[in-house]
Image (cartoon, grey):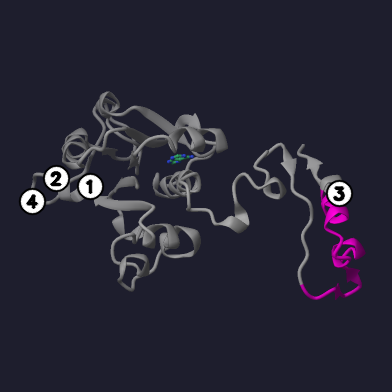
Amino acid sequence: MKQFDIVTIFPGIFSAKGGPASGGDSCCYFDYGIMRQAIKKKLIKINIHDLRKSTTDKHHTVDDRPYGGGPGMILMVEPIVKMLKSIKKKKKTRVIMLAPEGKKFDQRQAERLAKYDQLILLCGRYEGFDARVEKYIDEKVSIGDYVLAGGELAAMVVTEAVARHVPGVVGHEHALDDETFSHDLDYIEYPQYSRPESYKGQKVPKILLSGNHAEIKKWRQSKRKKRK
Ligand code: ADE
């Protein structure tokens, strides 16, 4: 089983604990579709860790003002290091900080990260982390060249893209290595149609109704386009 440990100050954004996938009834992203199935089948495990639980003061402080002045707040080093120590490590673990300045995430990165038994995903907020946190992480990952309010959406994106590489998570009909569903992202897939056969003058190509699978395959191949 592959394990994802997500560290956040907003655990309510996720609901791996308490949602239908784990027997409860509060819903969130991972409680739907293939992620829900993957959790139910115990192919993956997603633990959500509330950073505030690793604080030592009575106010559960996780952030403070930056030394030297400047806007915003910084996530403090101590709760993060305490949290990292408390998360039980598997054999092959990678500690990842989600940050816009990190290495750009793509399908290749998802495949690479899928080789670990456990990913610990640190979600930033505010103006980021105290720089001393860097000593405790393996890498920084960005999901794109834009700045989000925090790392939570990025952690969800990374978790799902990596989970799809865990054997059994993606069902037969979408098999990753199915030649009709090639993951060569340099190509745009052929167009697909479902009922009705005719919609406001737009008809489903006749070939797809022919039952001739060899010809259908040829047609689909001819419709794949190189991405710009
Ligand atoms: N946190 C804020 N923006 C982010 C991004 N683009 N990728 C990863 N983490 C982030």
Where residue 29 sits, quadrant-wise, is bottom left
2 vs 4, front mark: 2
Highlighted magenta segment, given as a residue range: 195-220
Tell me the SS state at disc 3.
helix
- SS label for mark 1: helix
Q: Amino acid at mark 1?
A: Leu
The residue tagged 2 is 55
Graded by Cα atoms within 10 Å as few (under 14), some (14 to 19) or many (20 or more), the crowding at tag 2 reads some
Q: Nearer the viewer, mark 4 or mark 3?
A: 3
Give 137 or 87, whichever is nearer the viewer.
87
Q: Amino acid at mark 2?
A: Thr
Name the amino acid, label 4. Lys
* Residue 141 horizontal/vertical position (percent): 44, 34
The residue beneath circle 3 is 218
Between the C-alphas of marks 3 and 2, the distance is 61 Å
Q: Position of residue 42 (x, y in %)?
A: 35, 56
Q: Mark 1 or mark 4, which has the lower sequence index?
A: 1
Which is more foreground, mark 3 or mark 2?
A: 3
The disc placed on residue 51 is 1
* Residue 58: mark: 4
Task: Quadrant for the C terminus, please.
Answer: top right
